[in-house]
Amino acid sequence: KLRPCAQGGGGPRAPAGPPVRRPLGGAAAAAAGGGAGRPAGTAGCGQAIVWRNVVLMGLLHLGAVYALSLVPRAQLLTLLWAYFCFLMTALGVTAGAHRLWSHRSYKAKLPLRIFLAAANSMAFQNDIYEWSRDHRVHHKYSETDADPHNARRGFFFAHIGWLFVRKHRDVIEKGRKLDFTDLLDDPVVRFQRKYYKSSVVLMCFVIPTFVPWYLWGESLWNAYFLASILRYTISLNVTWLVNSAAHMYGNRPYDKYISPRQNTFVTVGAIGEGFHNYHHTFPFDYSASELGLKFNPTTWFIDFMFWLGLVTDRRQAPKDMIEARKERTGDGSA
C-alpha cells in the first residue's frame, strides 16, 4: 500500500501572505549572478574553470555527433540495444540515485539496490553518494549560490556550465551542514563508491560495446560509438535538462513562487522526471508526480518492483494535501 506522508516538502509552506516572487534570470542573471541573500550576487565568486572537463565534454559531444552518422550503417539490434542501455542508464539515475537514495521516497531490497547501483554506474554521473549529496543540497538551497546548478545563473550554467567550474564555496560550506550518514550506512552505496571507476568502465563502456559485437556481429566501432558514446551523451543531456529546462519552461500548478516547472518534453526524455514543480513541492513522493494517467515510466518501474516484492514503503503525498497546496500557491493551471 501507499504510505501517505505528514508533511510536504520543497518550496514555501503555507505563507500567511503572498510571498515575494523570486525572479528567474536568463542571460542577465547569468552575467549578474544570483544567490542566497544576494539576488544578483554570483558574479565574482571566483569559480575557476576546470579545463579538463571542458575538453572532455567537448570531445564527448563531438563523438556523439559523429555517432549519428553511423546510425544508417548499424544493425537494428544494435540501435535497440543502445536504447535499452539508455533506459537502464535512466533508471539508475531516476529510480536509483534520485528517488531512492536522494529522497528515500521508497525502500528497496538488496537485489534491487544492487541492480540500481549497477545501472547508476552505467550512467557515469558521479557515484551514488556524490550524486545524492549534491541533489540534497540542490533541494535545500535551490536557486542560491549553494545550489550546485543554480538556474538563476542562466540556462547554460544550469545545464552543463556548472560542471565546467569548481564548486561555489557556498555549495561546499552549506553541504557540510547536511547529514549524509544514511547513504554511507548502505553497503551497496559504499561498495559502488569504492569501486566506482572500475564499475563505470565495465557498465558504461565495456558491456554496451561488447554485447552487440559478441552476440550479433556488430563492428566494435559501431557498437562503441552508438551504444556507449551516443547513448551516454544523450543520457547526460536528458538529466541536465531537468536542471535547466525544467527550471525555466512550463507551468507551475503547485507552487508559483518557485522556479521548477512542469515540462512535458523533459518528462518524456527523462522517463517521468519532468513534473518538476510537483517534485520540488513534494520531494518525498516516490512518483515525483500526481498519480494517475501520466507518462511516468520510473513510477511504473517502482510499482512493478513493488508487485515483485522488491519495494516497500512507497511514500506519497495525500490527495487533500496536494489539492490544498494547489489552491494556496498554484498558478491555476491544470
Image: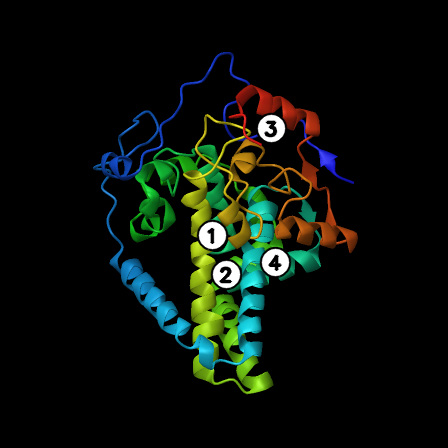
Mark with earlier residue (1, 2): 2
Q: Residue at x 56, y 51 (%)?
A: 94
Mark 2 neighbour class, 10 Å CA radius: few under 14, some 14 to 19, many 20 or more? many
Secondary structure under badge 1?
Answer: helix
Instruction: Determine the image quadrant of residue 70.
Output: bottom left
First reached walking from the N terminus: tag 2 or tag 3: 3
**Image quarter of residue 292:** top right
Instruction: Choose the circle earlier in sequence order: 1 or 4.
Output: 4
> What is the distance, in whole Å, between disc 1 and disc 4 at their CAs?
16 Å
Cα distance in 3D space between marks 1 and 2: 10 Å
Q: Which residue is mark 1?
A: 239
Crowding at mark 3 (Cα within 10 Å: few <14, some 14-19, many 20+) = many
Marking on residue 8:
3
Disc 4 residue type (three-letter):
Leu
Q: Secondary structure at mark 2?
A: helix
Asked whether the viewer can see residue 313, the reply is: yes
Comparing 253 with 86, the one in front is 253
Residue 116 placement (x, y as % from top left)? 61, 58
Amino acid type at image mark 2: Ala
Q: Give the foreground label among 4 and 3.
A: 3
**Disc 4, SS:** helix
Residue carrying label 4: 116
Q: Are marks 2 and 4 in contact (CB under 8 Å)?
A: no
On residue 123, the disc is 2
